[in-house]
Image (cartoon, grey):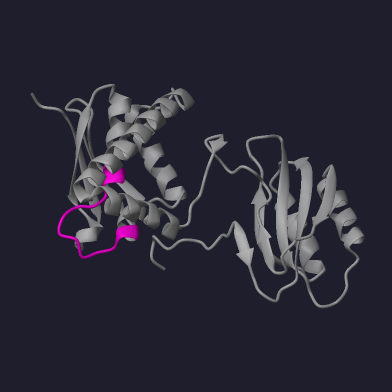
Amino acid sequence: MDKFDGLDISLVTDKMGSRLRGLVIKNLENIPEQGEKIFSTLKRYNLNVLSYLSSSVVKKKVSIYVCVELPEEGLEYDRIAAELKDVTGAEEVVWRDYPIPGFSHQPFFPLTCFSRRGIFFLGHVLRGSFEGIRKQLGASVAKVLLYHMGRMGGLNRAEEAKRERPDLTLKQLVVRFLLAGYAFGHYVGELVEWDEQRRRAVIRTRQNWESAMLGRGHNEPQCHFTRGFFSGFISGLFGEELTARETRCECMGDEYCEFVLEARRL
């Protein structure tokens, strides 16, 4: 198995022809054995689990949502809910029906990223936005615009990161930043060089969302938003302006995208 292969954990399930229902298990104690109790109970009733989500796990009490595929035979739904409530100690267990047959969605709104609202877009939506910018403004203007859009986002993220984890070193904040990008599907990022004294960093990304969206066949680097985002984040951490160059790019057929960030030289 390739080390970059992802897990197919869906926030939305669209399974045509299947009978789906949701179970919301509210306010149960956050202890390790709860998952085993829930899954063993559902297995006994021949319920196939399609997705399993939990609210914030840093709290003492959590709410758990399970999307299940129902068997053909009829079930005593109230009995299942009562049993789950009893074995987990939950405050309440309720079934959730879906308005569209075979289509389920996660019920926790909004999704959060570092306790802030997170927003997801499908790739073709972003692709359309970026292509529209390039078409309407021209490639040279779009390059500058996308860079500065990313840069402002990176600067804001750096200020948030320093407030969130004042206990971490600057290097640790960068690693945390890259791991978050990996978790959110932005890229597989790696900090390959870090020189705090010289204000220099080199970051490589594989499966970068921007290069994947734009495709290969280009003769120069194309990840201007990502370059700006990295530049803003590292500049924000150091409190001084750093330049950012993309020296390799998957859009040009390279194995990875590489971004070199350095302090401005007079």
Q: Residue 112 occupies which quadrant of the picture?
A: top right
Q: Residue 3 occupies which quadrant of the picture?
A: bottom left
- Magenta segment includes 172: no
The picture places residue 12, in percent across and down from the top left corner, at: 61, 59
- Magenta segment includes 222: yes
- Above or below residue 166? Residue 209 is below
Left or right? Give the position of 162 relative to 119: left
Tell me where the magenta segment starts and ends, as one range.
213-227
Q: Residue 37 occupies which quadrant of the picture?
A: bottom right
Q: Is residue 188 visible?
A: yes
- Above or below residue 29? Residue 40 is below
- Of 131 and 45, which appears nearest the observer? 131
Residue in the picture at 34% in, 53% down: 132
The picture places residue 99, in percent across and down from the top left corner, at: 75, 61
- Above or below residue 197? Residue 103 is below
The picture places residue 248, in percent across and down from the top left corner, at: 18, 53
- Of 107 and 123, which appears nearest the observer? 123
Residue in the picture at 44% in, 56% down: 125
The picture places residue 160, in percent across and down from the top left corner, at: 44, 27
Quadrant the N terminus occupies: bottom left
Left or right? Give the position of 61 relative to 84: left
Residue in the picture at 74% in, 50% down: 34
Left or right? Give the position of 1 relative to 86: left
Residue in the picture at 82% in, 68% down: 45
Q: Main secondary structure of the magenta part?
A: loop
Quadrant the C terminus occupies: top left
Left or right? Give the position of 143 relative to 44: left
Q: Is residue 255 visible?
A: no
